[in-house]
Amino acid sequence: MTVRLVLADDEQLVRSGLRLILEAEDDIEVVGEAGDGAEAVALTRRLDPDVVLMDVQMPGMNGIEATREIVALGREDSSRVVILTTFDLDEYVWEALRAGASGFLLKRTPAEDLVAGIRVVAAGEALLAPSVTQRLIETFRARPEAAPARDLSELDDLTGREREVLGLVARGMANGEIAAHLFLSEGTVKTHVKRIFSKLGLHDRTQAVILAYEVGLVRPGETPEE
């Protein structure tokens, strides 16, 4: 499969460098370039790429707003957004993940990791999941205890077992670890995770972590019950 990709960055030099790296790969095609968020959204509507590599700080519409609009297009095989940023887990990245981005890469990321990350996202996985999700969880744990930002009723469509699995995903556990913890097969856990994503309209584990904490299913510092 060839990954069709749009580059969004307000610096022409950055876009040119990224294009050189990416188009050296046989399975990646850069189909468009955007200098701001509005142009990125327009190109996504017109070209329907597999992945949009999105800078955060751009003039006019920034990368967060653009990500939100792209995710809101609601296509069956919607374009997946990867945030490209200078700072590791800054507030911009946090807001972009909440807006529906599938992960993020740092601008200092080595070329081979950039290419690998794009392939991971294009294949339908989250760039942060499951192992790197732990860093996202640490962000929650560092925040003061507060009332849930969203209502627990958002999980009403889930079965009891699915809620349990979601809680363990939110604690950074991989499918194999969840299977061992719940005495299930890994295949059964994968099925539960897939159904959770479908019922809640989630793209990946990163969004699952955010939702679980925001509705209060999981609290900072809690550990799974034995």
Image (cartoon, rainbow, N blue to C red):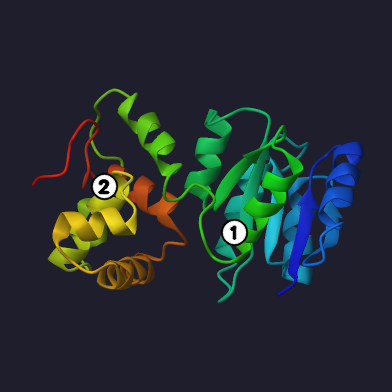
Identified at 63% across, 54% down, the residue is: 81
- In this view, the residue in front, 186 or 12, is 186
Kind of residue at badge 1: Val
Kind of residue at badge 2: Val
Q: Could you classify mark 1 by the number of other residues whose Cα lies within 10 Å: few (under 14), some (14-19), or many (20 or more)? A: many
Location of residue 31 by image quarter? bottom right
Residue 158 visible in the displayed image = yes
Q: Is residue 51 above or below residue 8?
A: below
Location of residue 176 by image quarter? bottom left
Name, please, the residue furthest toward the left.
Answer: 226
Q: Is residue 97 left or right of residue 49?
A: left
- In this view, the residue in front, 51 or 178, is 178
Q: Position of residue 35 (x, y in %)?
A: 84, 45
Q: What is the distance, in whole Å, between disc 2 and disc 1 at their CAs?
A: 26 Å
Identified at 65% across, 60% down, the residue is: 119
Residue with the mark numbered 2: 215
Residue with the mark numbered 1: 121
Identified at 23% across, 61% down, the residue is: 179
